[in-house]
Image (spheres, helix red, strand yellow):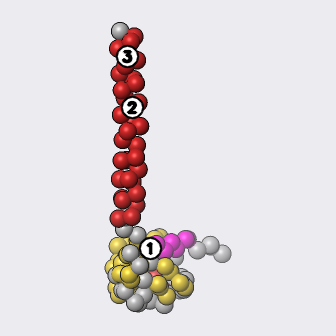
Amino acid sequence: MRRWMSGVALAALVAALATAPLAQDARDKTEKAAVRFEPIDVVSTVDPVYPANVVSWGTVILEVTVDETGALDGIKVLRDLPPFTEESQRAVKKWKFRAARLDDEAVRSSLIVVFSFPPRPVG
């Protein structure tokens, strides 16, 4: 029984060593064929203004789409909280972007932007 187990272990080791170069070749081909994606780069930002005479607080979530030239292409409100939403959109419209890249080619892409408006201090 022990001799049989040694033979199985030896056969498994030989098989593993024989397929190791094949596995490395497969990894090399996969790495060469892998798609390279670079997300949108936010170059500059402007903070939203806390609206006057507002005593509430909360979070606004926006989906911002940037085209191939890095220009703002659209803003979709994912979490609305008036009047903070309007201020958040106004701020994002002033941001500057560098477009996302897919295999070194600029592409249209989106990113999520979250603005938190904490409670104002009383007094």
Q: Quick one: label 1 or label 2, which is nearer the N terminus?
A: 2
Question: Is residue 64 visible in the rendered structure shown here?
Answer: no
Query: Residue 60's x, y, as percent?
Result: 43, 74
Q: What residue type is labelled 2?
A: Val
Whole-Å distance between the Cαs marked 3 and 2? 14 Å
Whole-Å distance between the Cαs marked 1 and 2? 42 Å
Q: What residue type is labelled 3?
A: Met
Q: Quick one: label 3 or label 1, which is nearer the N terminus?
A: 3
| Relative height, residue 22 to residue 45 (above, below) | above
Classify mark 3: residues with Cα within 10 Å, few (<14), some (14-19) or many (20+): few
Answer whether residue 14 is magenta in the image.
Answer: no
Q: Which amino acid does label 1 sit on?
A: Glu
Query: Residue 101's x, y, as percent?
Result: 41, 78
Q: Residue furthest right?
A: 123
| Relative height, residue 65 to residue 7 (above, below) | below
Q: Which picture quadrant has residue 66?
A: bottom left
Q: Residue at x 41, y 71 (%)?
A: 37
Q: Residue 38 carries which label?
A: 1
For this rendering, which residue is in front, 40 or 123?
Answer: 40
Q: Which residue is drawn at 37% across and 47% down?
A: 23
Q: Which mark is residue 5?
A: 3
Left or right, residue 63 beside residue 91:
left
Left or right, residue 122 beside residue 89:
right
Q: Which mark is residue 114?
A: none
Q: Quick one: label 3 or label 2, which is nearer the N terminus?
A: 3
Q: Residue at x 40, y 57 (%)?
A: 28
Magenta residues span 113-119
Q: Residue 14 carries which label?
A: 2
